[in-house]
Image (cartoon, grey):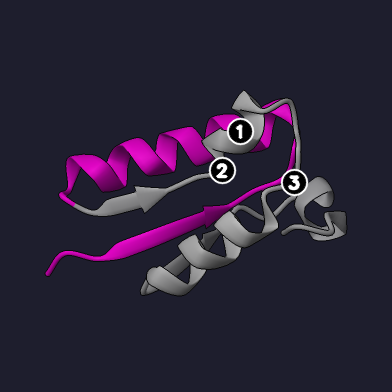
């Protein structure tokens, strides 16, 4: 069964590496994955509406837990 996955992670290199690895594994397994790549491309400009839309469209959420993600307003 194909799953639609939203990955939430903190804004630090270790979290980003973990999220990228998780996304790669999930995509290789045939799952549709959304990460906040657009946030990075737009220099951190918050895309609240786009994030909310992507989250609502996904059936599953993966939360990469770290000190940064736990304190993040967006996570």
Disc 3 to disc 2, C-alpha distance:
10 Å
Q: Which residues are magenta?
A: 1-30
Q: Which residue is mark 3?
A: 46
Which badge, 1 or 3, comes first in the chain's sequence? 1
Q: Which residue is mark 2?
A: 36
Disc 1 to disc 2, C-alpha distance:
10 Å
Q: Position of residue 7 (x, y in %)?
A: 51, 53
Instruction: Answer with left or right where residue 22 lies relative to residue 17.
Output: left
Q: Residue at x 39, y 70 (%)?
A: 57
Which badge, 3 or 2, comes first in the chain's sequence? 2
In the image, which is nearer the foreground, mark 1 or mark 2? Answer: 2
Label 2 sits on a secondary structure element that is: loop
- Whether residues under marks 3 and 2 lie with C-beta atoms below 8 angstroms apart, the answer is no
Q: Residues within 10 Å of mark 2 (few under 14, many from 20)?
A: some
Instruction: Answer with left or right where residue 12 lies relative to residue 8.
Output: right
Which badge, 1 or 2, comes first in the chain's sequence? 1
In the image, which is nearer the foreground, mark 1 or mark 3? Answer: 3
Q: Nearer the viewer, residue 53 or 75?
A: 53
């Amino acid at each position: 069964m194909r799953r639609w996955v939203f990955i939430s992670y903190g804004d630090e290199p270790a979290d980003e590496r973990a999220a990228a690895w998780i996304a790669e594994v999930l995509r290789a397994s045939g799952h549709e994955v959304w990460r906040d790549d657009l946030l990075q491309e737009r220099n951190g400009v918050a895309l609240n509406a786009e994030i909310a839309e992507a989250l609502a469209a996904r059936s599953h959420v993966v939360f990469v837990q770290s000190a940064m993600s736990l304190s993040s307003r967006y996570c």
